[in-house]
Image (cartoon, grey):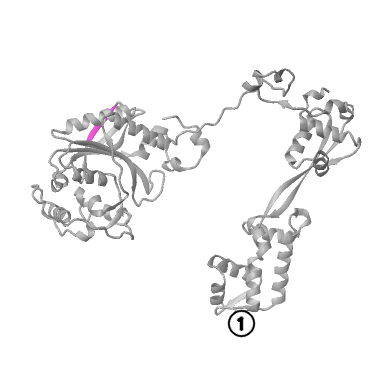
Amino acid sequence: MDADALLNPERRMLRVMQQKENHEWTLEEILSACEWTDQAVAVGAGHGLSNTGLVNTSESSSALVRLADEGLKAKENGLLEARIWNWLSKSDTPDMKGLQSEFERHEAGPGVGLLKRLGVQLENGVFTSANPSDVSTKIEARTAFLHQLPAASESLDGELLEHFKSRRGLIESVISTTRTWNITPKGQSVEPESLQEKQSISEITTELLQSDAWKDADYRPFDVTLESATPRTGRSHPMQALIERVRSIFLEMGFSELVDDYVQTAGWNMDALFIPQDHPAREMQDTFYLENPKSIDLPKHLTDAWGAIHEHGGETGSVGWGGDFSADTSKKGLLRTHTTVNTIQYLAEHPKEACRVFSVDRVFRKEAIDRTHLPEFHQIEGIIMEEGANLQMLVTTLKTFYAKMGYPEVRVRPAYFPYTEPSLEIEVKWRGKWLELGGAGIFRPEVTEPLGISSPVLAWGMGLERLAMLVLGLDDIRQLYISDLEWLRNQPIL
């Protein structure tokens, strides 16, 4: 055996073991003799020596029961049933009311259940026991069991072991492996002089090659036939990558990004967009209304203008929705249900300035979580306001946007939305099928005229998660937000 091929830990361990030819070395003896503190070093050196036939390794495994996190707390502070029983034994009024005032709520309930199984009764709110000494004996046995650990499972009381297995976080079972080593005749025959430790170079650096030290250095052998490991590098989450892709397309088309607050009023979120105040989308099952702020002030001229539009159409030529308009309803605080609420506020602040703006941001709706719905998701929206804007411009812009997204085949169909007329549904061709991806249209006069906007406003939007499902080939929207690193590593770069 060529000792030059051995690593320094292997040389030290073999040199120590040569001092006792027929001795079976335990891990503790090896650590002490080699002056090591890390078990992994000893086990690794022993494994290397065994592979070369210089040492024999013997292994035995056994199940070891030890305290888990809650068990360590119970050992220090006492078991929950022991602490409650101790209180009951000393209390003048051992009733449920006293228990709840003495112990935290998360302890009182489970504690009562534990005591009932020990024979403690709760009658008319008062705790009683027909055999207090039996309860104390059982609790003492449980406490003693915890103080036995760690221990081999076969040495423990089987009934108590099963009891603690049924209680979460008190004990855990691990497999304990014991190793011993003894030197072989081949290991004994290695010359001690060849087992002297020396510096072994495992990395060739520029500094090493620039000196003469490399000529006399001892190099660790490398197997150049082994496959190299693929380095794990950071990358964007598919959703964030898709957001950046959408952003870059809008910016390339001459749009500016709009970012605004999640918290809005029902007035801007719905009334400004000519959504009637009795519309189902306003109900609690669709909208997250807030307790704080429950109400947000709005200028009176706005609520008056919206009220006129909703009740009789104002001066737009519309007949409105009829009925009574409530300014208090407009002032309700909520989490925005779409990003159009921010767009319409931007247009109201710049009613005479031509603009092209977009947003990719979060919206909130009270949806039940399933494979196609989330209560919090992202919406993509684009707006064009300029003199002469028309339906043909909207359709051309849509086709350009989706072509840049990788969907050259786009068609539009008539649709209905409360705040646009005409309204369109946008469909793209994917794997030979037409899929609806969003809505579009031209804002109605009932939306623009109360805000002083005289130019046509073209608008379109869609859900980002739906687009992500299409791009990534998913059939469950929840996959986008599961922390599955393997799935994330395998996703294409968008």
Q: Is residue 225 visible?
A: no
The residues colored magenta run 409-413
> Is residue 384 or residue 489 the one in the foreground?
384
Q: Quadrant of residue 421?
A: top left
Residue at 70% over, 18% down = 212
Q: Quadrant of residue 422?
A: top left
Q: Secondary structure at mark 1?
A: loop
In the rendered view, would you say 194 is above or below 268? above
> Is residue 360 or residue 203 the one in the foreground?
203
Residue 405 position, x and y percent, is 33, 29
Residue 86 position, x and y percent, is 66, 73
Residue at 28% over, 37% down = 358
> Is residue 342 or residue 53 the one in the foreground?
342
Tell me: 441 left or right of 95: left
Residue 368 position, x and y percent, is 38, 51
In the rendered view, would you say 373 is above or below 238? below
Instruction: Write down the residue under mark 1.
Output: 92
Find out whether residue 412 is within the magenta segment. Answer: yes
Find out whether residue 378 is within the magenta segment. Answer: no
Quarter placement of the C terminus: top left
> Is residue 221 or residue 87 the one in the foreground?
221
Quarter placement of the N terminus: top right
In the rendered view, would you say 130 is above or below 455? below
Per the picture, the main secondary structure of the magenta-coloured stretch is: strand
Residue at 77% over, 30% down = 8
Q: Is residue 229 visible?
A: yes
Residue 159 position, x and y percent, is 72, 61
In the rendered view, would you say 417 is above or below 148? above
Q: Mark 1 is on which residue type?
A: Asp
Residue at 85% over, 32% down = 15
Tell me: 41 left or right of 15: left
In the image, farthest residue toward the front: 211
